[in-house]
Image: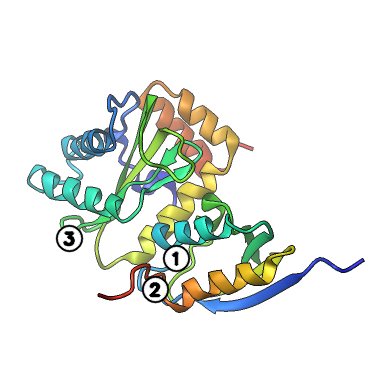
């Protein structure tokens, strides 16, 4: 029996307005494409990263440090994709 | 921050007559203007700004809830209203469901933290099924106000 793959990764919110509704919905929509469990931790609080209502309760302001946690077969791919969202600051369209 | 700190009591709409997103937003902003919490002269600008924000992605966050919002320089503190739609409003929500509970927020441009805390507050209560169910059943503004106060005081279990 192989253990269930589990990954964690730390990211920093670099958004002037914090992790508000727009970026939160990008995270949820992306996370829902993966089958793994996906949680986001801020300090002592841990919420379901596939739930909009859960994510919004983090109220993660600019500069907040979050830990992404994924558990399941595609955990690594999920974290890679979601961390990339943070890295490109949730910009969806490449500049023209 | 409590719900009753930023939800304008006089602007609550318990029977929103709107079939479309634009009609819903218009009805709610007009209600805020009638309550005096935004100026009538700013009404159209605020409606336009909220609709523009919706173009970036629907604020229909699922579970029959939408949180249309904008920043606007005409307010010096965050103001919000709640509308309930019996028939549901088509809102292009994340889960595709029509929307029955709407929270509309207008916040000052220089206070992103307040907006974030208001969203935190609203979503924390909406996670409580009792709150959602009682809110959907409320038929008067007073019933909504009572419910907000119970939620603020953590009396909903």
In the image, is B113 to the left or to the right of A44?
left
Tell me, yes or no, whether the two marked residues, 1 and 2, touch with CB atoms within 8 Å. yes
Using the image, tell me which numbered label, if any, was put on residue A19: 1
Q: Is residue B65 above or below residue B88?
A: below
Could you classify mark 1 by the number of other residues whose Cα lies within 10 Å: few (under 14), some (14-19), or many (20 or more)?
Answer: many
Q: Is residue B42 above or below residue A83?
A: above
- Across and down, in percent, residue A77 comes to 63, 70
Rounded to the nearest whole Å, what is the CA distance between mark 1 and mark 2?
7 Å
Q: Name the residue under label 3.
A: B73
**Could you tell me which residue is drawn at 27 percent across and 34 percent down?**
B24
Rounded to the nearest whole Å, what is the CA distance between mark 3 and mark 1?
21 Å
Q: Mark 2 points at which residue?
A: A15
The residue lying toward the viewer, choosing from B104 and A7, is A7
Check disc 3 and report its element: helix, strand or loop.
Answer: loop
**Are the residues flagged by discs 2 and 3 from a single subunit?**
no
Which of label 2 and label 3 is nearer to you? 2
Check disc 1 and report its element: helix, strand or loop.
Answer: loop
**Are the residues flagged by discs 1 and 2 from a single subunit?**
yes
**Could you tell me which residue is drawn at 36 percent across and 27 percent down?**
B141
Residue B106 appears in the rendering: no
Q: Quadrant of the C terminus of chain A?
A: bottom left
């Amino acid at each position: 029996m192989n253990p269930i793959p589990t990954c964690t990764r730390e990211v920093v919110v670099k958004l002037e307005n914090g992790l508000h509704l727009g970026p939160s919905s990008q995270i949820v929509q992306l996370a829902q494409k993966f089958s793994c469990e996906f949680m986001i931790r801020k300090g002592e609080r841990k919420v379901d990263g596939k739930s909009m209502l859960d994510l919004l309760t983090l109220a993660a302001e600019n500069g907040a440090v979050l830990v992404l946690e994924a558990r399941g077969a595609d955990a690594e791919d999920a974290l890679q994709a979601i961390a990339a969202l943070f890295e490109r600051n949730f910009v969806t369209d490449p500049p023209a | 921050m409590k719900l009753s700190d930023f939800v304008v009591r006089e602007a609550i709409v318990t029977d929103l007559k709107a079939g479309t997103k634009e009609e819903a937003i218009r009805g709610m902003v007009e209600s805020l203007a009638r309550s005096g919490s935004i100026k009538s002269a700013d009404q159209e600008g605020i409606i336009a700004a909220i609709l523009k924000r919706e173009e970036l992605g629907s604020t229909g966050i699922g579970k029959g809830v939408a949180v249309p919002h904008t920043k606007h320089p005409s307010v010096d503190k965050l103001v919000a209203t709640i509308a309930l739609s019996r028939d549901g409003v088509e809102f292009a929500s994340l889960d595709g469901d029509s929307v029955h509970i709407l929270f509309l927020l207008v916040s000052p441009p220089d206070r992103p933290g307040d907006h974030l805390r208001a969203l935190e507050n609203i979503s924390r209560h909406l996670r409580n099924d009792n709150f959602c169910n009682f809110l959907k059943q409320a038929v008067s503004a007073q019933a909504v106000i009572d419910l907000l106060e119970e939620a603020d005081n953590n009396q909903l279990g």
